[in-house]
């Protein structure tokens, strides 16, 4: 009797409509990839807007990009790559049943994600002070181009949507820490870690493109 | 085929460090002022390499099922279609650029 309950507890993650843990894992991962495809095309619309307007106003992009601080953009790129590394290490810890390592790596990731958001906050605050606001609220005189607000509308939409994704990622990591502390996650069932990791890496990939496209063109 | 590939810590650090180095290179090439349009080509090429490294070795596509690889490739293909067809319109308009 006690033997079956141990087996049941270990298999408690397995939903009845799956044959085994592996099938459930593969199904979840494929579902996540389908979601990531929609995410790529979601951001793709904004990248399309960026490209169309850059083709129309190449000079505007060169001038307006000088308002963005390359140093802090580069620091944030490094911060996100570092967090991708810790997420990959978190998945490895889960695969090896090292729950303590998993939690530590998740905490570092959450810390790096907050670092990213704090730097982003100071960048936004600095621009708001100057009057560089999105859309019709734009009232900065420092750029001699009548369409200067267009660049910053695109900037705020792209980095803003990316920032929302980072915040959602922080929420997911906290959820993972809670799950790990309840001893739900182990080497036989780490699907939530794997899937959140895929999401987090995609957020990193988006920023890998945003950084040169927005900060490095001047 | 297996979705349970376990990378060694050394390997993951190697991938991370290569991404840091590429980030430094992409910033460093802006110091030597490559003429238009090659500065954009270089910046995007480095970003594509970085993105492929993340997708292959952090998102484990290198060891993943062909189906998941196909999903990723199709998203890029459809993104290309979105850009390509949109530019066929906006680049060849006889009307002036809209006021917004």
Image: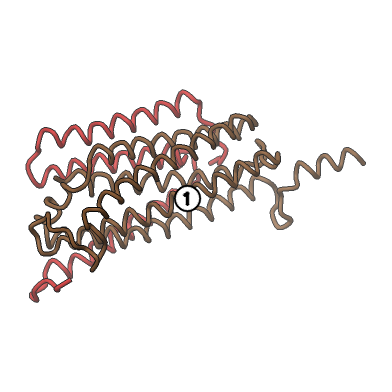
Chain colours: A brown, B red
* Residue extending farthest top: B10
x then y, percent, for residue A46: 30, 60
- Is A167 placed left or right of B42 in the picture? right
- Is B78 placed left or right of A20 in the picture? left
x then y, percent, for residue A43: 35, 58
Check disc 1 and report the residue beneath it.
B68
Kindly identify the residue that appears in the image at 13 percent across and 33 percent down. B31
x then y, percent, for residue A91: 55, 36
Q: Quadrant of residue B6?
A: top right
Kindly identify the residue that appears in the image at 16 percent across and 34 percent down. B29
- Is B98 placed left or right of A171 in the picture? left
* Residue extending farthest right: A1
- Is A210 placed left or right of A1 in the picture? left
Chain identifier of the residue bearing label 1 in the image: B
Q: Nearer the viewer, residue B9 or A177?
A: A177
x then y, percent, for residue A98: 63, 29
* Quadrant where the image shows the C terminus of chain A: top left
């Amino acid at each position: 009797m006690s033997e079956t309950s141990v087996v049941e507890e270990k298999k408690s993650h397995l939903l009845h409509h799956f044959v085994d843990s592996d099938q459930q894992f593969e199904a979840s991962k494929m579902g996540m990839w389908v979601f990531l495809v929609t995410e790529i095309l979601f951001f793709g619309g904004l990248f399309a807007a960026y490209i169309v307007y850059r083709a129309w106003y190449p000079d505007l992009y060169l001038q307006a990009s000088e308002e963005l601080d390359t140093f802090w953009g580069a620091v944030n790129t490094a911060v996100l790559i570092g967090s991708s590394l810790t997420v990959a290490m978190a998945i490895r810890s889960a695969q090896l049943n090292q729950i303590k390592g998993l939690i530590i790596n998740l905490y570092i990731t959450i810390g790096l994600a907050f670092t990213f958001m704090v730097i982003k906050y100071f960048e936004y605050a600095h621009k708001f002070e100057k009057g560089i606001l999105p859309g019709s609220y734009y009232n900065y005189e420092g750029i001699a181009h009548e369409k200067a607000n267009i660049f910053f509308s695109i900037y705020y939409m792209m980095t803003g949507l990316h920032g929302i994704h980072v915040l959602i990622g922080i929420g997911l990591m906290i959820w993972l820490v809670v799950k790990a502390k309840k001893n739900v996650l182990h080497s036989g069932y780490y699907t939530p870690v794997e899937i959140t990791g895929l999401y987090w890496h995609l957020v990193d990939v988006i920023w890998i493109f945003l950084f040169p496209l927005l900060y490095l063109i001047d | 085929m297996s979705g349970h590939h376990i990378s060694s810590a050394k390997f993951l650090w190697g991938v991370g460090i290569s991404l840091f180095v590429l980030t430094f290179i992409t910033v460093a090439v802006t110091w030597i002022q490559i003429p238009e349009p090659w500065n954009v080509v270089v910046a995007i090429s480095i970003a594509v390499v970085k993105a492929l490294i993340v997708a292959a070795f952090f998102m484990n596509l290198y060891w993943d099922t062909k189906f998941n690889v196909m999903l990723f490739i199709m998203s890029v293909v459809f993104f290309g279609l979105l850009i390509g067809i949109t530019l066929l319109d906006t680049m060849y308009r006889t009307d002036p650029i809209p006021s917004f």
